[in-house]
Amino acid sequence: MDSIQKDLLLQIADLHGVPEGAYNLRANGETQGRSSTANVDILTKTDGKSGIDIIIKPGTKKESVHIPVIISKAGLQEVVYNDFYIGDEADVVIVAGCGIHNHGGDGATSRHDGEHTFYVGKNARVKYVEKHYGDGDGNGKNVMNPTTVVHLAEGAYMEMETTQIKGVDSTKRLTKATMAAGANFIVKEKLYTHGQQTADTDFVIDMNGEGCRADVVSRSVAAENSRQNFVSTMNGNAACHGHTECDAIIMDNASVTAAPCLTANNVDAELIHEAAIGKIAGEQLIKLMTLGMTEQEAEEQIIKGFLH
């Protein structure tokens, strides 16, 4: 990898080189490295689609899987399908993400559309971390459209952390989940947009099993002329507990729309939604400026703490 690709890998996966354990590194549309372990198999798909199957054996504990994607070739556009099969009683960490460096002086668009589908077995636990990052010379566009589909079996637990760091001109982020009895689904989304960027987030959670719980929390900052649209739909089809929250800071001439939607189809479904959009409080700025910060430095510090 060259220095640009190494920087992208660091930004999206906190990696300085080849990770330990199971991994698949995709760069500019091709596999650049892959390793399986005794408990984790990574296989090229055989159904004609571009992507991989990740098969994690039942009972696997304390293992990690890294599957980062980097694009440094201006104008490259791809669609990738990755399927995860997590066995019963497994407990694993999966680190994904996409980084694009677009130096397309002619206005070329670099684009990565990724669809990840998770089949999480009974009483299995998964922590899934996904980061998106873009940079370049400012002439080309970086587009990322992640789709995440989650199927949680009885007693399964999945924690999902998604972060859009910077430099993504357009993104459509769709997450769908179905939940069986006793399953837990925790989502923590962090999103920052600026310039003319647009970001659309859509969650659809079907809570089908008795005693399942879902908690979806999105924190976002929209600056300059960017636009964000947040939609969260929770369907309580059994005795369950669901919570969805959108908390956004709006700056400059940006626009933010939040539309939480709850549907209770069972008398014992407990569903809660919260949505708050507002500017940075003046007293927060003043307090930090009295400590010697400029207004811009104070804003940056507040945003950093809000998205932490």
Image (spheres, rainbow, N blue to C red):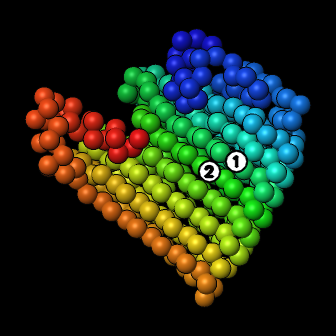
Q: Position of 37 compared to 275: left or right? A: right
Q: Are marks 2 and 1 in contact (CB under 8 Å)?
A: yes
**Viewer-nearest residue: 236 or 123:** 123
Secondary structure at numbered mark 1: strand
Give whichever of discs 2 and 1 has the lower sequence position.
1
**Viewer-nearest residue: 71 or 11:** 11
Mark carried by residue 80: none
Residue at numbered disc 2: 159
Disc 2 to disc 1, C-alpha distance: 6 Å
Q: Residue at x 83, y 28 (%)?
A: 36
Q: Residue at x 63, y 59 (%)?
A: 185
Mark carried by residue 126: 1
Q: Is residue 8 above or below residue 208?
A: above
Q: Can residue 141 be seen in the rendering of this structure?
A: no
Q: Position of 176 compared to 123: left or right? A: left
The spot of residue 113 in percent (x, y) is 61, 43
The spot of residue 56 in percent (x, y) is 83, 42
The spot of residue 69 in percent (x, y) is 63, 31
Q: Residue flagged by tag 2: what amino acid is it? A: Glu
Quadrant into which the N terminus falls: top right
Quadrant into which the C terminus falls: top left
Q: Can residue 62 be seen in the rendering of this structure?
A: yes
Q: Quick one: which residue is furthest to the top in this view?
A: 2
Snapshot quadrant of residue 152: bottom right
Q: Is residue 65 above or below residue 265?
A: above
User: How many labels sit on residues?
Assistant: 2
Q: Residue at x 49, y 50 (%)?
A: 189
Secondary structure at numbered mark 2: strand
Q: Residue flagged by tag 1: what amino acid is it? A: Val
The spot of residue 75 in percent (x, y) is 54, 29
